[in-house]
Image (spheres, rainbow, N blue to C red):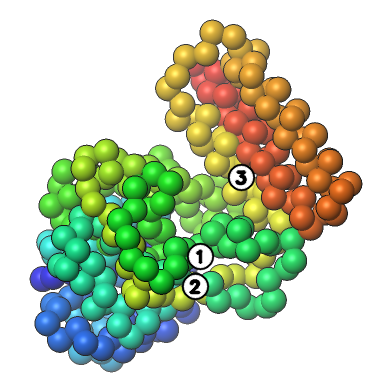
Amino acid sequence: MDISVVISTFNRSQNLPDCIAALDMQKDAESVSWEAVVVDNNSNDDTPAVVASLKKRYAYPIRYLFEPRQGLSHARNCGITQTRSKYVAFIDDDILVEPQWLRFMCDGFRARRSDAVGGRIRVESPRPIPKWIQPEMYGFLGQRDFGDEGFYMDGIKKFPFGGNMAVRRTMIDKVGVFDTRMGRKGEGRKREELFKGEETDYFRRLAEAGGRIYYEPNAVVRHRILPYQLEKKFFRTLHFNAGFQNAQLDTNFYPRTLGGVPLFLFLQTVRAAGRYLLQTATKGPNLSFRQQMNVGYFLGMIQGYRKRNCLV
């Protein structure tokens, strides 16, 4: 088997028919042997029945796996351990791949001799995107677009996003699987569920191990976002949780702390708040919201260090 396409899903069986149908539309991939692997991350809807129906409808192989441990990283790791293909690709149930996606993803490995490949992710919104979501913030909605030219990413500043990425099996054997302390839990609507960072961590490890990561601009997918992802609460929570998680995982020692929080962090928070107030006064609330998110990140870090100190 050349490539396994791992589709992680949780309580969104309504997304699976379109996701699977898009995979069925692949062109110029006759030389590629592949399968779709749906990983049910402990859903309580009709996901098993929907997958069973789809398996009868399409000619290409569709497998169903059940992962009881909640979390996107657990689901992806299940897909990794339960497949044996040369390459493992990852998409979510709200992703629609373009007709030549499979061909170009494989070309990224074969022609470029890469250890990992990431393609473009274009956002499809159910309603007009609010003005306070500036174009540079689209990445928080899952968009990934580095332009029309392919290149090797460094894995640190530039790396694939989870809605459109693939890794060579031999590199997985070397680097390991996703860190299950990171990543979305459940539907990602509640504060305790909306975590990320697993892809940042994974590709950093892959790059440190000498892996070559290629950006393939012709491997395109569309990401269908949900209305709640266009709310300010979603963006605030993302950044608060990112700060909280980074503090929880920080292994550095800080000699000067207050309540377990490094002292310099209080100054950074005050400065960020000042920049936010200044931008609000000079540019308006829409253009200053990005800075408000930064304030939330620092507040999340403070909470993360305080909670970690309480557990020591």
* Disc 2 and disc 1 in contact, CB within 8 angstroms: yes
Distance between mark 2 and mark 1 Cα atoms? 5 Å
Query: What's the mark number on residue 5?
Result: none
Q: Amino acid at mark 3?
A: His
Q: Residue furthest front?
A: 149
Q: Residues within 10 Å of mark 3 (few under 14, many from 20)?
A: many
Helix, strand, or loop for circle 3?
A: helix
Which structural element holds mark 1? loop
Residue highlighted by disc 2: 122
Q: Which residue is mark 3?
A: 239
Front: mark 3 or 1: 1
Disc 2 element: strand
- Residue at the spot 41% in from the left edge and 51% down from the top edge: 158
Percent position (x, y) of residue 185? 47, 52
Q: Is residue 124 above or below residue 158?
A: below
Above or below, 208 relative to 222: above
Using a 10 Å C-alpha cutoff, classify the residue at mark 2 as few (fewer than 14 neighbours), some (14 to 19) or many (20 or more). Answer: many
| Residue positioned 83% across, 40% down in the render | 277
Q: Nearer the viewer, residue 228 or 114?
A: 114
Residue shown at the point (46%, 76%) measured from the top left? 222
Q: CA distance from mark 2 to mark 3?
A: 22 Å
Of label 3 and label 1, which has the lower sequence position?
1
Q: Provide the residue designation for mark 1.
A: 143
Q: Tell me the amino acid under the disc marked 2.
A: Arg
Q: Which quadrant of the structure image shows residue 113?
A: bottom left
